Image: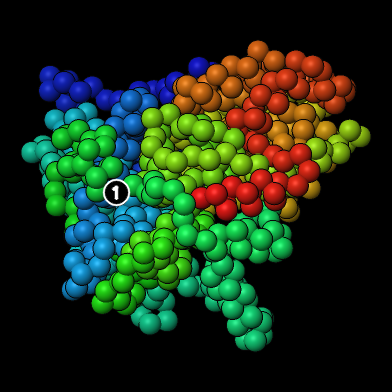
Amino acid sequence: MDRSGTVLSAKAFLPQGPGSPAPVPRELVLGAMPHGADPARFLAAGPSCFAGREEFFPDWETAFTFAPEPLRDPAVARRAARAAQALAADTIPRLAAWLCPHADALPAAYWQTLLAPWAVDMARQLVERDLRADAMTRAWGHLPLEVELLPADHAFRFQDEHDFTLRGALGTDFNHWLLSRLLEARWPEAWTRRFPAPEVPATAADAGSGQDEGDACDDMGEPPFRQWLRRMARALLLALPFPRLKGMGAIQTLRFSLALCHPCHGPDHSLDLAAAFGSRGEGPRAAQDGAPPLDPLPLFQAACPQSLRALEHPEKLARTGRPRLRVASILAYEDAAYRQRLARWRGRGHRLACVQHGGNYGMEAVACETAFVEYSQDVFFTWGWRRHGGERGNFLPLPSPQLTRLAGKWHGHDGGHLLFVGAEMAAWGYRLDSHPTPLQLVEYRQDKEWFFEALGRDLQEKTLYRPYFPLPGCLEDAAWLLPRMPRLKLCTGPLTPQLLGCRLLVLDHHGTTLLEAMAADVPMVLYWNRAHWPLTDEADALLDRLAAAGIWFPTAEEAAARARAVWRDPAAWWQSPGIQAARRSFCERQALFGNGSETPLWTQTLKAL
């Protein structure tokens, strides 16, 4: 890879015309790259082919040829997000009928609340992989390729939504299977199918998911009574009208719950997903060519988690005449039983509110899941912003308790280390939002090396590197960087104490850490490739102001130069009027925190809803 971030040796594209010279017989790999694969013979569906096996292919980034990535264009990514939303909205009624014989007796709000998080997650995978399959057939359909497919009856058993994310959206086998189905629907005549030898059936001892094993490990050594207490405490907290959220104390949670014990005053702003996102609704419609070339329902059925399959549904739900509001915990994304409780609530005519729980809200140019699941509720409480591009929602800004607890808490004036925090590097494009594509993440990772080379040896020795927490299906992080930069030290343990005590922070992405650091008033230097992290117009304007103040830079080398220049006294530089004005402007729009206690403002707002 050269310094401009261009993948060399024709690794992004092959000659696409039918008149191109006949190549050496080649194989297209959809799953894991076979050990010892010759780059002259094997084509890769993407960086995902090397996730978890980079050590066996030390030069894979430049040695292998990759399929084109269709989502490099933000406009295409935006259309893909709309297509996924439409697919999810259209599929929810069909999923409901499959899961429950009397589905029509229950209101649409019940099924939409229950199924939306997983349905849109599965739809995101299907649409992204379909675009990738289409790109491969367009680029390589004329070549005589051999392709190993997983059979249609390949069995998957996901325990819950979290398990689906880890072993499905980020899983090699599931994505290999999904690409197999999508490629079969548009199979080029020049290609040859090959299926792997049948596997030996798993025994009871090794059946099940890794998630089950993790749960078992978590419970090892803990007395049954303590396990029961922990589950009961969680259930009680989730039963409150306002569950405890990050940064909130128990007393605060109880006060907020009491503030919601009244009938709703105003109109219901909840969105019907079929009308707002469906292909036949009045909202933004997906283009006709965004639909997959096959019936998606069997794919949804094959991937449906056991947590959804096992639920028993009420025969009917009596509608209330006095609707009330309750706040949904972020656990609704992963806890089907809790989400069913919310679904019953919504099915009776009550309302839900969601609360911002991290970064990127109001900033990303493309928002698929959050707009579909959270913005569609009656209220969405933000950390300062009032508009997220063209997304629909009833957005109410309030000071974040999470950020208020950190406001002004930086104490690293005499600190001796620079803290560098990295981002997730998923080798599968599983989010369908404004994160970099997998090949762009290869460039993103390379930029880390350029940054530290420009930083110099002295500051390298004073740097703590914080990788993203480990997930399957991702590129190597610290294991890739630290051998190349042996002077760096690994940052372990809770991040917040390190954040508040560092002398200088460096971030190569936007997200939750950026918002927390802004609230805590941590001196920081930022850089990333703006084209790889597309923002809304409002967020772009804030970034322009950070750039004018000398906080954000477009390249790793410029950021390293600024870090070297301010290292002697980062606090003095950071407290200069121009820097602080840019910081305050950013916090007002993206990292709002309270001056003192934010409880009265929250309570007053909740009582007025």
Q: Position of residue 366 (x, y in %)?
A: 40, 33
The reply, left or right, for residue 218 in relation to residue 320 is: right
Identify which residue is drawn at 43% across, 24% down.
Answer: 7
In the figure, 443 relative to 375: above or below? above
In the figure, 517 relative to 96: above or below? above
Residue type beneath disc 1 = Leu
Q: Quadrant of residue 446?
A: top right
Query: Would you say residue 171 is visible in this rendering?
Result: no
Element type at mark 1: helix
Q: Position of residue 587 (x, y in %)?
A: 66, 31
Q: Which residue is mark 1?
A: 273
Q: How many marks?
A: 1
Query: Would you say residue 576 is visible in this rendering?
Result: yes
Q: Position of residue 294 (x, y in %)?
A: 13, 48
Determine the residue located farthest toward the left in the rendered image.
189
In this rendered view, identify the residue nearer to me: 405 or 154.
Answer: 405
Q: Quadrant of residue 84?
A: top left
In the figure, 555 relative to 355: above or below? above
Identify which residue is drawn at 49% across, 39% down.
Answer: 395
In this rendered view, identify the residue nearer to me: 258 or 558.
Answer: 258
Identify which residue is drawn at 57% across, 25% down.
Answer: 528
Q: Quadrant of residue 81?
A: top left
